[in-house]
């Protein structure tokens, strides 16, 4: 299909409510700062990408909307209590009503993605009707969903969403194309995700923010402490039990 017929859709919840599963590591302000930095990394890749017809951010967060507009990205107002499924459905219906050819849903917590990844999705996406999927690396989620037309299939985000999206497309006779894109696999939801991201080359706005905020150093120190404790637990038990006095083994 024409390379510039997919609209990127980025659903964004309020930064103040983002990344609750990182609460054991980050306080509320740090979680908001991380969400903001990741969102900007994603927008830097998507905005004015030649393989996209445009980019649309779906949000009710005023700061996210302002960041999007500053980068020349469209904004679609979201209801305050709407979840991910409702936000993506809203975008799909809006784009379909505007006779846009297709949409590519990209989560706002994929700071590792590059322009080349978007190019591969656009090039691999078939002529309409079509569905292209990229799975999350660890939790069965869907980290990229391309649909032509935008409302070609039901939106199934939630637990094990990749399987549900795949089955829903198959049931409609759409034979989904599945791509493996390592940079798309790492969404940052849990502490282990954040540590895995920090181990990657530090080339993103998110890396810079983690260093400047002091979080990177704090998490590395914590990780090193855990490793050291694990190593100590794995050491052989000392010889006290072997050197017990012989009298303990004498029969009375």
Image (cartoon, helix red, strand yellow):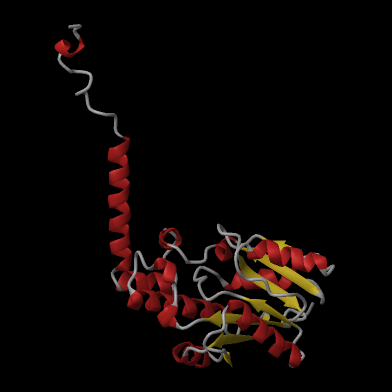
Residue 71 position in % (x across, y down) = 52, 89
* Residue in view at x 16 percent, y 11 percent: 246
Residue 136 position in % (x across, y down) = 59, 62
Q: Is residue 61 left or right of residue 24?
A: right
Asked if residue 125 shows in the view, the reply is: no
* Residue in view at x 52 percent, y 93 percent: 69
Total label count?
Answer: 0
Res 196 quadrant in image: bottom left
Asked if residue 194 shows in the view, the reply is: yes
Assign the N terminus to one quadrant of the image: bottom right
Assign the C terminus to one quadrant of the image: top left
Q: Is residue 87 left or right of residue 5?
A: left
Res 129 quadrant in image: bottom right
Residue 121 position in % (x across, y down) = 68, 70
Res 156 quadrant in image: bottom right
Residue 113 position in % (x across, y down) = 55, 69
């Amino acid at each position: 299909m024409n390379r510039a017929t997919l609209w990127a859709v980025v659903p964004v919840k309020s930064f103040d409510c983002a990344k609750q599963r990182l609460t054991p590591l980050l306080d509320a302000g740090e979680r908001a700062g991380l969400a903001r930095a990741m969102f900007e990394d994603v927008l830097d890749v998507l905005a004015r990408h030649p393989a996209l017809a445009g980019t649309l951010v779906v949000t009710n967060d005023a700061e996210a909307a302002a960041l999007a507009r500053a980068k020349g990205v469209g904004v679609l107002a979201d209801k305050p209590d709407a979840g991910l499924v409702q936000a993506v459905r809203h975008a799909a219906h809006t784009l379909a009503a505007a006779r846009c050819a297709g949409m590519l849903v990209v989560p706002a917590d994929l700071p590792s993605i590059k322009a080349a990844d978007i190019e591969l999705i656009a090039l691999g996406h078939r002529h309409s009707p079509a569905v292209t999927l990229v799975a999350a690396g660890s939790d069965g989620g869907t980290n990229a969903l391309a649909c032509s037309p935008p409302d070609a299939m039901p939106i199934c985000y939630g637990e094990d969403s990749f399987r549900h999206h795949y089955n829903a497309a198959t049931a409609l006779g759409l034979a989904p194309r599945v791509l493996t894109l390592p940079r798309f696999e790492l969404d940052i939801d849990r502490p282990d995700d954040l540590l895995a991201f920090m181990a990657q080359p530090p080339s993103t706005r998110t890396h810079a923010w983690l260093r400047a905020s002091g979080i990177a150093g704090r998490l590395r120190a914590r990780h090193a402490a855990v490793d050291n404790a694990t190593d100590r637990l794995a050491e052989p038990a000392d010889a006290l039990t072997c050197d017990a006095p012989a009298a303990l083994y004498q029969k009375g």
